[in-house]
Image (spheres, rainbow, N blue to C red):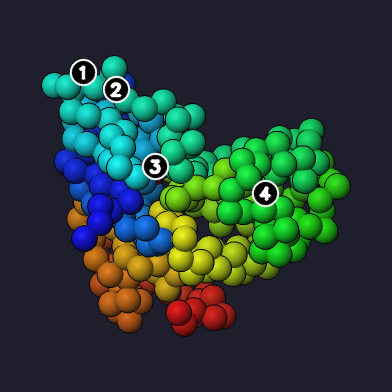
Amino acid sequence: MSEPLLEVVGLSAGHGDAVVLEDVSFTLERGEALALLGRNGMGKTTLLTTLMGLTRVHGGTMRFAGRDLAAAPSHARDLVAMPTHARARAGLGWVPQEREIFPSLTVEENLTAVDVGGRWSLERIWSMFPRLKDRRANMGGQLSGGEQQMLAIARALMLDPALLLLDEPMEGLAPLIVQELFRIIREMTRSGDLAVILVEQHAHQILPLTDRALVLERGRVVHLGDSAPLVEDPHRLDRWLGVAGAPTLGDMPAETTP
Ligand SMILES: Nc1ncnc2c1ncn2[C@@H]1O[C@H](COP(=O)(O)OP(=O)(O)O)[C@@H](O)[C@H]1O
Ligand SMILES: [Mg+2]
């Protein structure tokens, strides 16, 4: 069998001396979609920023696309840790919780500014994000929150990632935009050539879009398994997520079958 796209083994990391993630291990295959779940403050964002090289790694290993992102401290970790921009070039795409776009460039300029000539041409972006196509001449700063989120995702795609990290992309958006983002994320996860780690508070909404689910509790992995059984029995998530994991009436996306 070929090497997984991402292999995290015994990872401990945090902010300064505070250790947030403890002994986190998981793998991700090419094209696979992983739901990263857990209540507020459990370490989801820290795991994504650790993959991007923005936290302090205390131990463990991360291999991405055949390269070590950080080796164990005994191997002079600080000397070999790959810088964030190099991780992006190696194929790690990241859409942070605070949608970062260029407000004084047009939508189209936001995209062409980062075009690396990869698999996501402007045409392919326009067909996936028709709303952005309509707004192509508008300044980034003139867009609604939902449109800015779409632009942030589209921009990450222009960098041609093998793995896209999405941190609560639906947070604070209007229901209509949320439905549109579901469609976009569903298209991305089914395209087969893009792996996705998707952080979301509302587990039941994203489980149908993902292959597997990882649940963090106080920085530790308390569950890692296929998403399908959790879709059929969402209350299994209650013990880790409380009410956030359970569906409420009329809250399911309209089309969830794979
Ligand atoms: N920049 C930071 N400096 C210090 N502590 C942080 C920082 N960011 C997050 N934390 C702490 O790390 C823990 C995990 O936070 P986070 O990864 O943001 O959780 P989640 O994304 O699951 O809500 C929390 O206790 C939080 O207070
Ligand atoms: Mg977070």
- Contact between marks 1 and 4 (CB within 8 A): the answer is no
Query: Which residue position is annotated with label 1?
Result: 76
Is any atom of residue 175 visible in this view?
Answer: no
Q: Image quadrant of residue 196?
A: bottom left
Q: Is residue 125 left or right of residue 94?
A: right
Q: In the figure, 121 relative to 218: above or below?
A: below
Q: Amino acid at mark 1?
A: Ala
Number of labels in the image equals 4
Judge the density around disc 2: few (<14), some (14-19), many (≥20) Cα neighbours within 10 Å.
Answer: some
The amino acid type of the residue labelled 4 equals Leu
Q: Residue at x 37, y 58 (%)?
A: 30
Horizontally, residue 247 falls left or right of residue 125, namely left
Percent across and percent down for residue 168 are 49, 52
Amino acid on which disc 3 is placed: Leu
Residue sticking out furthest to the right: 137
Inter-mark Cα distance, 1 to 3 = 22 Å
Distance from Cα at disc 4 to Cα at disc 3 = 20 Å
Mark 1 or 3, nearer chain start: 3
Residue that mark 2 sits on: 80
